[in-house]
Amino acid sequence: MTIDIRFRYYQSNDREDCLKVFDANCPEFFAPNERSDYADFLDSSPEDYEVCMLGSDVIGAFGLSGNDPLYKSINWIMISPKAQGLGIGAKFMERAINLANEHRLSHIKIAASHLSAPFFAKYGALSISEVKDGWGPDMHRIDMELHF
């Protein structure tokens, strides 16, 4: 079965849909205290942030950003729980890797939680450091890198 999804750049009118995706992933994958940080990020009109569309619905979002010539960072990657298990995460990673290759980067930096780190590890990302409660109570931060 092929899922017909498309990516497009984030627009300010996507804000509420993105926050709904965040809320649907909280507290399982994001700490509740991160919501205001995410809202501030969205309000900053991030240039390299994209939404993932299934039909007319925003089902996810992510960004690959930064100005370093060697690497970029994945920012605020999330998928609606109702769309998880459909292979969309693989499409996110494929897109991130393709963008990194287009920019001739050596690696992608990922700031994950202990819950999302296994997903990134499936693509070869390695844990660089860990901070207990780094995202909030019981939400440990795992800094990772995916090298090419």
Image (cartoon, helix red, strand yellow):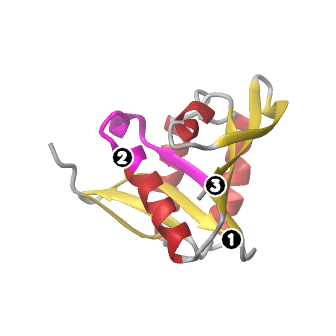
Look at the image and tell me in which quarter the N terminus lies. top left
- Which disc, if any, is residue 88? 2
143 with respect to 147 (left or right)? right
* Residue that lies at the very extreme toward the front in this rendered image: 148
What's the magenta region? 76-90
Q: Is 140 within the magenta?
A: no
SS of the residue under disc 2: helix
In terms of depth relative to the viewer, which is nearer, 122 or 58?
122
Foreground disc of the pair 2, 3: 3
Look at label 2 and name its amino acid.
Ile
Left or right of 2 in this view: 138:
right
Q: Earlier in the sequence, mark 3 or mark 1?
A: 1
Check disc 1 and report the residue beneath it: 44
- Can you give x and y, in whole percent of width and height, for residue 129 in the image? 82, 38
Q: Is residue 104 above or below residue 93?
A: below
Residue 91, percent from left and from top:
38, 52
